[in-house]
């Protein structure tokens, strides 16, 4: 990838900071070497249009776009210059929904979720409502970023939080290129600290999973064999253990879209996604059992639609208006970026789906 | 020169070769697919072998395809370049070892 930028698209006042501009680019799929079929037509071939939301199982809450990193591929366009932060009031509204729906998974994401000043309070409160799987998407370096975060491994352990962390590669060069200088060493240190309190050990209940997403304009390969390679090298070189590796496809939005266009890979990447389209992955795309809540409480089918400002197709548009009857069975809002979820073995926040 | 003999977009059309000879084309792709499955060698090792051979064969399509395939499998650029050197060493060794045949012939004809 090109030299790492240190500011979000928003701060740089890039045209792509505007989600409308991104959607325009995505829908204009006429390329030099042919025309890109629409995702809608593609899923219609197997009678899977419209995609419908099933029972709510996973509430994914984006507690803010602030982050200590500015990764090249970030689909949130997060960074230290982003100020959007979820309030306690909105968090309380989310807790109400979890209680009333019995969603079994709570998935906290950001930015760096730990940077929200109400983060610890929220984890404490949320741990009381009987969630089966309580995920925090931690970027690892935050644990080393500042003294006030050094105790995070113990804090996570106390509330039996399931830690899911990005790790683009087992080599320093590739990791730092995607996520910034020094990220690899800090991530290794953070993983060792998580291991030290019991996270990631083979028989431990303290779940530690890693997320792999490609460092450039190519798709992830087989999740199981990547996991084997990651486990071997991290164990041999650094004594690190973890449970599962989730291989994620980069969706062509936000900073990854910016990179694809700047590196003249956009057209080829879209074809890669379409060529790898797997109809079997469609029924399990994550939007079918997930709701994504933005920092200001609005509802989206997924984190990607949130970033593209494509709200749920329902009268209930805000977490304070959550209504099972209005939201279950709703038609999911799709666009060309959805090809990213159905390429190859499929891709969701929990890794492959097919 | 805007047009060359090779067009990168043609790689995506590789599968079309079955259109003019379905049986043979399908048999080739079936064989090809089997060769690259995980076996005694990992798919990652096979990708590196393919990358090295793509260079000795100097096939631009294969170079593009197996560079991407290697990246997808987490192969680093250092590993890729080393694989190419292995291909290059064998290629140059194979050229030079034929020098023995040349020497034999010289000795016979002009010894
Ligand atoms: S750590 Fe995550 S949220 Fe932060 S910039 Fe990187 S990808 Fe984005
Ligand atoms: S991008 Fe979002 S809406 Fe589209 S298929 Fe993926 S999860 Fe569903």
Image (spheres, grey):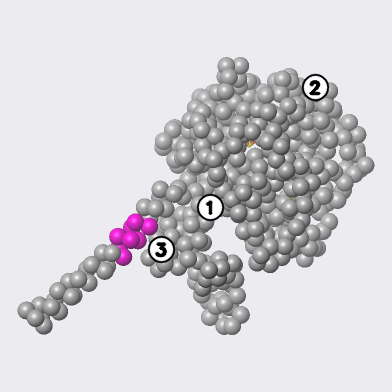
Task: Point out the image quarter for the C terminus of chain A.
Answer: bottom right
Spatial CA span between label 1 and label 3: 19 Å
Q: Nearer the viewer, residue B99 or A248?
A: B99
Residue A207 shows up from this direction: no
Q: Please state the extent of the stretch shown in magenta in the rendering.
A: B84-91
Say if labels 1 and 2 share a chain: no
- Residue A173 place in picture, x, y as percent: 47, 39
Q: Which mark is in front, 1 or 3? A: 3
Say if labels 3 and 2 share a chain: no
Farthest left residue? B111
Residue sitting at 74 percent across and 53 percent down? A26
* Element assignment for label 1: helix
Farthest front residue? B1
Image-based side of A337 in relation to A150, left or right: right
Q: Are marks 1 and 3 in contact (CB under 8 Å)?
A: no
Say which mark, if any, is on residue A331: none
Asked if ligand 1 lies within 8 A of label 3, the reply is no
Residue sitting at 50 percent across and 61 percent down? B64
* Element assignment for label 2: helix
Spatial CA span between label 1 and label 2: 41 Å
Pointer 2: what residue? Answer: A88
Mark 3 — on which chain does it sit? B
**Sequence-earlier tag: 1 or 3:** 3
Residue A13 in which image quadrant: top right
Q: Nearer the viewer, residue A275 or A1?
A: A1
Pointer 3: what residue? Answer: B55
Mark 2 — on which chain does it sit? A
- Residue A260 place in picture, x, y as percent: 63, 50
Q: Would you place residue A240 above or below residue A275 in this image?
A: above
Spatial CA span between label 3 and label 2: 59 Å
Say which mark, if any, is on residue B72: 1
């Amino acid at each position: 990838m090109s030299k790492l930028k240190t500011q979000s698209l928003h701060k740089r006042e890039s045209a792509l900071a505007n989600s409308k501009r991104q959607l325009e680019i995505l829908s204009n799929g006429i390329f030099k070497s042919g025309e890109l079929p629409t995702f809608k037509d593609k899923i219609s071939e197997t009678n899977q249009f419209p995609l419908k939301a099933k029972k709510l199982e996973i509430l994914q809450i984006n507690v803010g776009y602030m982050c200590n990193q500015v990764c090249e591929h970030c689909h949130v366009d997060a960074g230290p210059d982003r100020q959007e932060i979820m309030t306690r009031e909105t968090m309380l509204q989310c807790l109400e929904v979890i209680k009333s729906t019995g969603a079994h998974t709570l998935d906290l994401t950001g930015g760096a979720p730990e940077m929200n000043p109400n983060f610890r309070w929220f984890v404490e409160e949320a741990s009381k409502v009987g969630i089966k799987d309580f995920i925090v998407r931690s970027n690892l370096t935050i644990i080393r970023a500042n003294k006030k975060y050094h105790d995070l491994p113990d804090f996570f352990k106390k509330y039996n939080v399931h830690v899911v962390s990005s790790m683009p590669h087992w080599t320093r060069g590739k990791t730092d290129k995607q996520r910034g200088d020094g990220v690899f060493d800090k991530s290794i240190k953070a993983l060792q600290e998580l291991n030290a309190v019991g996270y990631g050990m083979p028989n431990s209940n303290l779940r530690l999973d890693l997320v792999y997403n490609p460092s450039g304009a190519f798709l992830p390969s087989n999740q199981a064999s990547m996991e084997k390679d990651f486990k071997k090298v991290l164990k041999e070189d650094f004594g690190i253990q973890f449970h599962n590796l989730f291989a994620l496809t980069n969706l062509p939005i936000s900073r990854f879209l910016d990179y694809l266009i700047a590196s003249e890979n956009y057209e080829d990447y879209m074809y890669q996604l379409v060529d790898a389209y797997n109809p079997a992955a469609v029924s399990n795309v994550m939007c079918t059992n997930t709701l994504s809540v933005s920092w200001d409480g609005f509802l989206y089918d997924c984190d990607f639609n949130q970033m593209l400002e494509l709200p749920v197709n329902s009268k209930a548009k805000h977490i304070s208006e959550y209504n099972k009857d209005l939201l279950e069975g709703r038609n999911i809002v799709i666009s060309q970026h959805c090809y990213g979820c159905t390429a190859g073995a499929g891709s969701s926040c929990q890794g492959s789906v097919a | 020169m805007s047009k060359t003999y090779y067009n990168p977009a043609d790689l995506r059309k590789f599968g079309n070769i079955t259109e003019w000879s379905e049986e043979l084309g399908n048999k080739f792709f079936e064989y090809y697919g089997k060769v690259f499955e995980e076996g005694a060698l990992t798919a990652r090792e096979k990708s590196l072998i393919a990358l090295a051979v793509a260079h000795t064969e100097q096939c631009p399509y294969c170079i593009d395809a197996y560079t991407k395939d290697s990246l997808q499998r987490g192969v680093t650029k250092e590993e890729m370049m080393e694989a190419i050197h292995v291909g290059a060493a064998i290629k140059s060794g194979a050229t030079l070892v034929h020098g023995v045949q040349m020497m034999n012939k010289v000795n016979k004809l002009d010894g």
